[in-house]
Amino acid sequence: MRNSGEPVSLEGVLERIVFFNEENCFCIASLRPSDPSYRENVTVSGIMPAVQCGETVLVRGEWAAHPSYGARINVREFESRLPSNVYGIEKYLGSGLVEGIGPAYAKKIVKKFGEDTLRVIDSDSARLTEVKGIGAERARRIKKSWDEQRGLREIVVALRVYGIGIAMCVRIMKRFGSESAAIVRSNPYKLCREIDGIGFKTADKIALNIGISNESPERIEAGVLHALAELEDEGGTCAPFGEIVSRAASLLQADSAKCAEGVERLLASGDVKRVGDGVLQSAPLDFAERKIAGSLARISRAASLLPPIKAEAAVEWAKARANVDFAPEQSAAILAALKNKFSVITGGPGTGKTTILRALCDILKAKKCVPALAAPTGRAAQRMGESAGVAAQTIHRLLGMEGGKFKHNEYNALPCKFVVIDEASMLDTKLAAAVFSAVPDGAHLVLVGDTDQLPSVGAGNVLKDIISSGRFPVTRLERIFRQGERSGIVLAARAILEGRDSLDAFPPCALEDADLSRDVNFIFADTPEACTRACVRLMSGGFAGRLGADPIADMQLLAPMHRGAAGIENFNASIKAALNPRTDGMRWAGTVFCVGDKIMQTRNNYDIDVFNGDMGRVVRVEGDNSGIVADFDGREVFLSKGDLSDFRQAYAISIHKSQGSEFPVVVMPLLRQHFIMLQRNLLYTGLTRARRKAFIVGDPSAWSAAVGNSRAAERRTFLRRRLESI
């Protein structure tokens, strides 16, 4: 053992990586020294980006003594070299670093090529087919992965100083491939424009560090686009010229005149559009809103391709078939859908939307016309199909994917004569444009949704804009029909919309005093700590059993906010520890994924056909540490390390992410600490996600504050004006 603080320089092979943090690249590893005077491996720790088992590294630092783990080298700097001996090469390739090579193939390849292995992979990869079991396709995958890893190392080293971890570097490599390093060095603003998760400030730090001027046109234009993107993140699709300039000037700490010039350049290039009265839009949202208006006009004016249907007689037939006496507004909704090329049905839970949908489907099936049913999320589609008796799918799967684009569009319309989109309040501007443009001229289109729910996560307010334009038939369902098992939830939801504090129907009580036969219970907990304890107890052990619920499959915690003691991140950690305390999983992007974990996708991934909001369960962690396998509604999907960057634990999710889903039992924490989010439509959306039971856990004054706050942030869009002019 050397003296603590003594400088040291040591070369060796990385035998084992004990710990690696993908966010900051801090690594603890076991090093097998090349110097024969060392009889045992040496522990090294420090910032070592993208290192892999089997690499030869030269570390420089100081000796240190750890009270629990003994002597180690605190690494100040390191150099990584590809392994040069057979032992190191086999360990390196067998680590799962290169796609297509696990421990077994690593042994075969090294046995065939020996110390020449890495040269063969790098510059003569066709020879890999000389190894038994490796065909041309596997050889191609190995070479592609090898090149990506080499580029990844270069990117990681270049970006580590800016706080960009490996997970984000993987995403950059996926988008730009071999050009990644050159783009980072020459035009870092391209990162924030094209890579989700890299903000303007990070790109700006890189740009200023490499010498791009503070008032360069590239920086000014990137700042203007970022200011516009921030406004879009808040839900709007357009903003006044002056507001964009003001935001950009504040962000860039630059002269307003320079920012105004930047806006004019972007207008000239077509990246920004002027849509009237000094109002601007990004080019993609301008295109999308025009596409929505044009598609609805086209559909509404074209002749129907449905077979002849006597609409009034068909409604009477559907009544007899269902053995239900439809209310006047239910009959009106069915008639509007059959008689008009485009129509809207809107109403809250329990107002008869399911009855209407089933009747429509029964009528159409009787006419040998099976409708296409779709919803924005997998859970909403599943529920829609079960209700209607016709298979339903997500909008993304309805449209299909080819080469990273939707297969069905204005040039290749959907092969159907009737389309129904459920949970239409979730449609953002871009998704609505895509699905509407794919509807054939002669087909009918029906939107079904609840305008009192939270608006879409993405920019726009499509359903409300369509309704408020006054250009299309709209049936409003207000009467509550369903008084059975959901009556407590439905009535509480109606009271919320009317601004009535209905706590007298489910008075706050201690968890032990909860009436589990009631639809809605309010569990008193006035601090984040008490709230967390109560939620965890509800979702584990005895309470879940008494509810007849699987705590992972049937119960879902919905929280208003992400951060803080009563935020989603803390709830996820606490609930996972209670329900699935395993730690023997795969760590990536700051999250450990273990078998049994409930996970959620946070952005659309067309490569694996899993989309924003989709939830699954981890069923396997691959032995070579290359990724995990998760089950999404009966479909097993392999998630690579790059894919995992977009996944989070989902024992607790946001109320926004729950839109379009229903869960047998919902647990919803509600505290004064959530004051920023305490709004009527948020509370209404969370409560109406519960199918059988809802537990509100928290402070009654927070409930009252939310019920009393009907002020939702206004979304500025240009769609309504476009619809009014068609």
Image (cartoon, grey):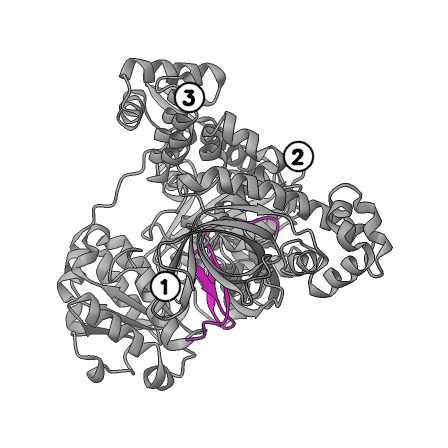
Q: Earlier in the sequence, mark 3 or mark 1?
A: 1
543 shown above or below 326: below
Q: Determine whether the residue tagged by mark 2 lies in a helix, strand or loop.
A: loop
Q: In this view of the protein, which residue sits in the foreground, 378 or 334?
A: 378
Q: Does residue 173 sit above or below 660 in this rendering?
A: above
Q: Quick one: 457 or 136, which is closer to the camera?
A: 136
In the picture of the structure, the residue carrying the numbered disc 1 is 65
**Mark 3 = which residue?**
212
Give the alpha-carbon distance from disc 3 to disc 1, as whole Å: 44 Å
Depth check, mark 3 against mark 2: the one in front is 3
Tell me the crowding category of disc 3: few under 14, some 14 to 19, or many 20 or more residues within 10 angstroms, Cα based. some
Looking at the image, residue 610 sits to the left or right of residue 243; the answer is right
Q: Is residue 479 visible?
A: no
In terms of sequence position, does the residue under pointer 3 or pointer 2 come before the other?
3
Q: In the image, is residue 220 part of the stretch drawn in magenta? A: no
3 vs 1, front mark: 1
For mark 2, does the 10 Å Cα neighbourhood hold few (<14), some (14 to 19), or many (20 or more) residues? few
